[in-house]
Image (cartoon, rainbow, N blue to C red):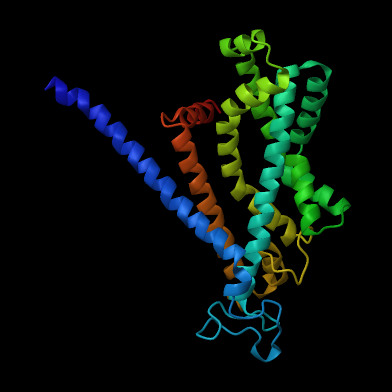
Amino acid sequence: MSGNTAAAPVRSQKLRKDYTRTRLFVFSALVAALLLVAVFADRICPYDPNGQDLANALQAPGPAHLLGTDRYGRDMLSRVLVGARTSIFSALLLVAVIAAAGTLAGILCGYFGGAADAVIMRIADICLAFPGLVFAMAIAAVLQGGIQNAVLALAAVSWPKYARLARGQTLSLRQADYIHAARLAGSSPGQMILRHVLPNIAGPVLVTAMLDIGTMMMELAALSFLGLGAQPPTAEWGSMISVDRSLLQTYPWVVLSPGLTIFVSVVLFNLLGDAVRDCLDPRGTGRKQKKIRDGRK
């Protein structure tokens, strides 16, 4: 009896681990398929995404045009597929930039401290004091719009959370015994950061970045919707919604097609981020701490 009781937690842990791995595999495959569609969009789209055919303008979804056509007769399916390249890869580039820049700044501040730490963290506090999207709108407006300027604007306001995360992790690692041992062994600061600090904080940074992809995708779409991101006739999901938003009640497919695509893409990236977090934190300590913080609020 005691043997069965002792084996129950082991079986439960194994089932939970198998379930987590299965989720990671499934969502990784779905995200990989989405990325492949974005990469080969030009080859798989049935029509020229910018080709106008006014005779077939605002056609409802049907066999010829699976998602219908817009006000200029352009095939919505082709524009949604080509728009995936702009929307998804812009978000991935943005997350890569802010994760790399913020993590580097946080590690340097946490490891060396001093005046540079104080200055960079005060700059981060200033960025965090403003609503992120509103601050990004102001910067994008100054830069006069465009998808590249939208990425720069969001990067300018989104790096502080990675800097704070990396700084906190570095401060906790700086006093670890193996760090002192490496220092006594003659390792240079660069070697210690690359060999000991960075590998130990890569997990939390990776999880944050994965969960941030969906957020950045929505914020890029929001800037494009407001005319501060991708400009027509560029096929980008937020811009497509903005251009045809007045047709929502009469010809809803021209707005729902890119809108539902944003929804599905964001959900897939968020689910993949959750799966990555569960794999890197199998005991769920990060989720428990979040629940504790939410309860205190």
> How many numbered marks does the figure carry?
0
Q: In what quadrant of the picture does the C terminus appear? A: top right
Query: Relative to 111, does residue 213 appear above or below in the rendering?
Result: below
Q: Residue furthest front?
A: 186
Query: Relative to 108, does residue 31 appear above or below in the rendering?
Result: below
As rendered, which of 44 and 9 lies closer to the eye? 44
Query: Residue drawn at (48%, 51%), measured in percent from left and top?
Result: 28
Q: Position of residue 139 (x, y in %)?
A: 83, 48
Q: Position of residue 85 (x, y in %)?
A: 65, 62
Query: Residue drawn at (55%, 57%), measured in percent from left and top?
Result: 265
Query: Residue drawn at (61%, 22%), measured in percent from left and top?
Result: 196
Q: Residue furthest top?
A: 184
Image quadrant of residue 77? bottom right
Query: Relative to 94, does residue 293 appear above or below in the rendering?
Result: above
Query: Residue drawn at (33%, 37%), measured in percent from left and top?
Result: 16
Q: Position of residue 117 (x, y in %)?
A: 78, 21
Image quadrant of residue 230? bottom right
Q: Is residue 160 left or right of residue 16?
A: right
Q: Position of residue 6 (x, y in %)?
A: 21, 23
Q: In what quadrant of the picture does the N terminus appear? A: top left
Query: Relative to 147, does residue 243 appear above or below in the rendering?
Result: below
Q: Is residue 235 left or right of residue 268?
A: right
On the question of residue 124 being in view, the answer is yes
Q: Residue furthest bottom?
A: 55
